[in-house]
Image: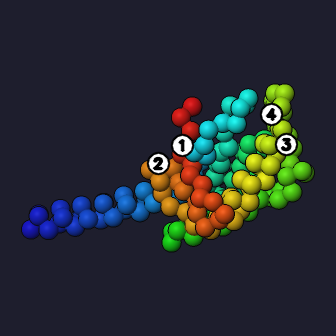
Amino acid sequence: MKLPCCAAIMICCFGVGAALAQDFPRDRELLLDAAPMRPSKRIPSLTLAADGRATFDLWCRSIAGRIEPAADGSLTVTAETPDLAQAPLPEMQGPGQCSDQRQQADLALLAALTQSNRWEAAGEGVALTGGPQPLRFRPATN
């Protein structure tokens, strides 16, 4: 009698663990899997709060938005400031940090983020797909 009960508990626990592993990472900084654009060490990141509010730290600017992931792998990403020219520049920026190249990279990254419509767990991070280019984010280690 004890064996079937233990098996049922193990199945339930593993099922719950698998479901939790598929949750979109929240309340932690996720870094874009990319090398920094020199001379800066900044790497774009995203942070998703439990209520869906998000912060997108791009190559140069930071903007607020929303990420609404669904259990079926679909995703909606919106930016509160779709016009990056209106987004504030970082307070602590060094010379050349917001070059034309970095500002163009901001536009491309924002487009890739807001056009992504699918997500999947990628190790401890997440991969966003369905847009002009797939984006892979990993947890920050600092």
Mark 4 / mark 2, whichever is N-terminal:
4
Mark 1 / mark 2, whichever is N-terminal:
2
Mark 1 / mark 3, whichever is N-terminal:
3
Find residue 103 and report its horizontal and vertical position in percent.
Answer: 82, 46
Q: Which is more toward the observer, 76 or 17?
A: 76
Q: Assess disc 2: are there few (<14), some (14-19) or many (≥20) residues with their C-alpha within 10 Å of its C-alpha.
A: few
Q: Assess disc 1: are there few (<14), some (14-19) or many (≥20) residues with their C-alpha within 10 Å of its C-alpha.
A: some
Residue bearing the label numbered 4: 97
Q: Is residue 22 left or right of residue 70?
A: left
Q: Can the viewer see residue 23?
A: no
> Could you tell me which secondary element the residue under label 1 belongs to?
strand
Q: Which amino acid type corresponds to the residue marked 3 in the rendered image?
A: Asp
User: Which quadrant: the C terminus?
Assistant: top right
Q: Which amino acid type corresponds to the residue marked 1 in the rendered image?
A: Pro
Inter-mark Cα distance, 4 to 2: 30 Å
Q: Which amino acid type corresponds to the residue marked 4 in the rendered image?
A: Gln
Find residue 87 and report its horizontal and vertical position in percent.
Answer: 86, 48
User: Which quadrant: the N terminus?
Assistant: bottom left
Q: Is residue 29 left or right of residue 124?
A: right
Residue positioned 81% across, 27% down in the render: 94
Inter-mark Cα distance, 1 to 3: 28 Å
Residue bearing the label numbered 1: 139
Q: Which amino acid type corresponds to the residue marked 2 in the rendered image?
A: Glu
